[in-house]
Image: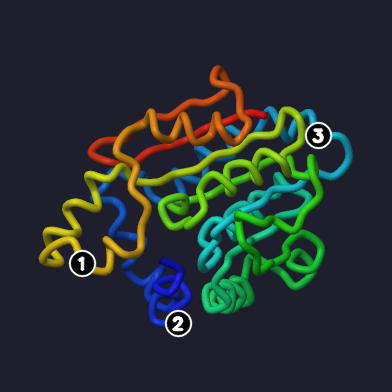
Amino acid sequence: MRDLFTSPSVSFAYERGWRQGFAAAGFPGPDKEAEFAMDYFAPAIAKAEGSNVLVDMSCATGLFTRRFTKSGKYDRVLGCDYSASMLQEARRRIKADPSLSPERRQSQLDLVRCDVGRIPMKSESVDAFHAGAAMHCWPELPKAASEIYRVLKPGGRYFATTFLSSYFGTLQSAEGGATGPSRQAFQYFASTQMLRELMEEGGFSREKISVEVIEPSAVIIRCEK
C-alpha cells in the first residue's frame, strides 16, 4: 500500500491532476475542504490554553498544510507524512509560496516524517488533527484511530475526508479487474458504520462521532475527544 505513495512520480503528480480527480467522488475542493475543517476546529482552538497545535497527517505535498498555516489561526502547524518524497515536494512548494515568509515558516510550520500508527507526540498535546483523503491509505487503521485519540487534548477535534468503497469499485473496473493498483493501494470502507465503529474503537464516544456522505462517495468524519 505504501509503495504507491512513496513513489516520487506520485508526489510529483499529486497537485498536478491526481488530487483534482477526487472531485468525481464528491470532494468539495481544497479551499472548501480546508474551510470546513477550520470551522470544525474553531471551538477547540478557542478554548486552547497557551499555544495551539494543529497536525495535518498524511499531508502529502502540503496542500492543506499551507492553507492552515496561511490562515493565521494556528500557533503551530505540523505537516506529517510517511513518504519522504511527499515531504520533499511539500517542502519545495512551501518555499516557493510567496505568502509563506521564511519567518512564518520557521515560527509556525514543521514537516515531520512519521507513521500515523506510531505518532511521535506526547499524549494530549494536539488541539486539532486533520487527515485529508488519507484514511483509505493507512495500513493499520485501528492503531491509527487509537493514536489520534491519544494525542488529542480533551476537547480536541479530528476532521478527515476519505472515500466509500464504491469509488474504488469504479477505479477497479477502469483498471480491468481486482488486481489493479487501486485494489492493492487502498483500504475499503463499505459503509459509514464501518468508519463510526473504527473511531469508537479508537476511543471516541459514539455521540461525538459524525460521518457525513457527500455524493456520490466522499465522506467527512468529525470526532471530538
Residue identified by numbered label 1 = 179
Type of amino acid under label 2: Pro
Task: Give the image location of residue 160, x and y in percent.
Answer: 50, 43
Q: Quadrant of the N terminus?
A: bottom left
**Residue lying farthest to the right in this orientation:** 50
Task: Give the image location of residue 165, x and y in percent.
Answer: 27, 45
Give residue 8's mark. 2
Residue drawn at the location 63% of the way across and 31% of the way down: 203
The answer to which of marks 3 and 2 sits earlier in the sequence is 2
Question: Residue 82's image quarter?
Answer: bottom right
Q: Is residue 17 left or right of residue 128?
A: left
Spatial distance from mark 3 to mark 1, Cα to Cα? Answer: 47 Å
Residue identified by numbered label 3 = 48
Residue drawn at the location 55% of the way across and 60% of the way down: 59
Spatial distance from mark 1 to mark 2, Cα to Cα? Answer: 22 Å
Mark 3 surroundings: few (<14), some (14-19) or many (≥20) residues within 10 A: some
Type of amino acid under label 3: Ala
Spatial distance from mark 3 to mark 2, Cα to Cα? Answer: 38 Å
Q: Is residue 127 left or right of residue 171?
A: right
Residue drawn at the location 38% of the way across and 50% of the way down: 29
Q: Mark 1 or mark 2, which is nearer to you?
A: 1
Mark 1 surroundings: few (<14), some (14-19) or many (≥20) residues within 10 A: few
Type of amino acid under label 1: Thr
Q: Mark 3 or mark 1, which is nearer to you?
A: 1
Q: Is residue 97 above or below residue 64?
A: below
